[in-house]
Image (spheres, grey):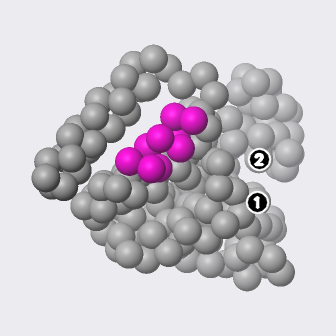
Amino acid sequence: AIRMYQQVLKVNPDHRDALFNLASAYIQLKAYSEAFPLLKKLRSYDDGNTEILLNLAIVEIGMGNSTEAIHLLDLAANQYQEPKFEIYFHRAAALSRLGRLEEALLSYKKAEELNPKHPNLNFNLAVLYDNLHQYNEAVNYYRAFVQYSDNLPRYEEKKIESRLRSLQAYLAGNRS
């Protein structure tokens, strides 16, 4: 797909769909520095496009620019009349990276109201509660992550199960 979009852009460097789809493909590969200039170019054409703002925010988070990501997510949120899962989810991720864990938790909880079975949301909440030393909640969200994840690689599942056993042993030791 990447080669196809690149070929389209050789013929027409301003083809908006090809720019957006190529940037999205790079985001899936976590090639944020490749997606960044494409999204900046798209934003110059349409500064208020929420999908461009959201993808640019994801790229900013991936490149370690969480403050800029929050700004972009706020701009995107202002375009919607109803709350959007993606805005809350990525805002929480950015806040978490900035160490603003309580604010991140609030944003994740708003995302959870919109899509409680989202696997990545459950995983991020598990890790956040783990970092906040709220281990009962962490256990619940790790379990939800495993339950709602399709095709979770076995090695990932083993890591989660190991963490669950550690937390459960810790919690059992504190009850006695």
Give the residue type that dot 1 points to: Glu
Q: How crowded is mark 2: few (under 14 residues within 10 Å), some or many (20 or more)?
A: many
Residue displayed at 70% across by 76% down:
77
Answer whether labels 2 and 1 touch (C-beta < 8 Å). yes
Magenta extent: 139-147
Relative horizontal placement of residue 25, taking residue 70 as reference (left or right): right
Q: Is residue 68 above or below residue 20?
A: below
Relative horizontal placement of residue 41, taking residue 163 as reference (left or right): right
Relative horizontal placement of residue 23, taking residue 59 as reference (left or right): right
Residue 174 spot, x, y in % from top left: 15, 55
Q: Quadrant of the N terminus?
A: top right
Badge 2 element? helix
Q: Which of 59 and 131 is in front in this view?
A: 131
Q: In which quarter of the image is residue 22?
A: top right
Residue displayed at 76% across by 60% down:
51
Residue tagged 2? 20
Q: Quadrant of residue 136?
A: bottom left
Q: Main secondary structure of the magenta part?
A: helix
Residue tagged 1? 51
Q: Residues within 10 Å of mark 1 (few under 14, many from 20)?
A: few
Residue displayed at 36% across by 70% down:
101
Q: In which quarter of the image is residue 87?
A: bottom right
Is residue 61 visible in the rendered structure shown here?
yes
